[in-house]
Image (cartoon, rainbow, N blue to C red):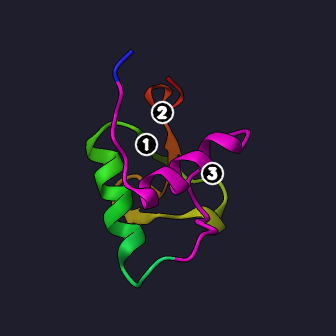
Amino acid sequence: MIQIQLSDAQAVILSTARAREDGAVCPVTASFKRGAVGNVCKSLLKRGLIEEVAATDLTTVWRHDEERGPITLRATPLAYS
């Protein structure tokens, strides 16, 4: 098993997502400094620990894509290993 080092913020967001039945990252319930959530999520995306998927619940939208529509984030299988 590969050990991935995470910052405290990354660990909080990822553990919350893993605790949810659907692995959803959004909404982020922890409080962070302004702009920190975006940076943390971008780093988790780069590491393959979370992924972008079509949002079916508009309260969980991460961003809007012109072609794909509303996008949200969820934990990948790698996040559970």
The foreground one among 1 and 60 is 1
Q: Which mark is residue 16?
A: 3
**Could you say which is closer to the camera, residue 41 or residue 65?**
41
**Magenta stretch bounds:** 3-31
Q: Quadrant of residue 22?
A: top right
The residue that appears at 38% across and 57% down in the rendered structure is: 41
Q: Residue at x 31, y 57 (%)?
A: 42
**Circle nearer the N terminus (2, 3):** 3
Q: CA distance from mark 2 to mark 3?
A: 11 Å
Residue drawn 40% across the image and 52% down it:
68
- Which quarter of the rendered picture does the N terminus lie within? top left
**Residue 80 colored in magenta in the image:** no
Element type at mark 3: helix
| Callout 1 amino acid | Ile
The amino acid pointed to by label 3 is Thr
Q: How many numbered discs?
A: 3
Sort mark 2 into few (<14), some (14-19) or many (20+) by Cα contacts within 10 Å. Answer: some
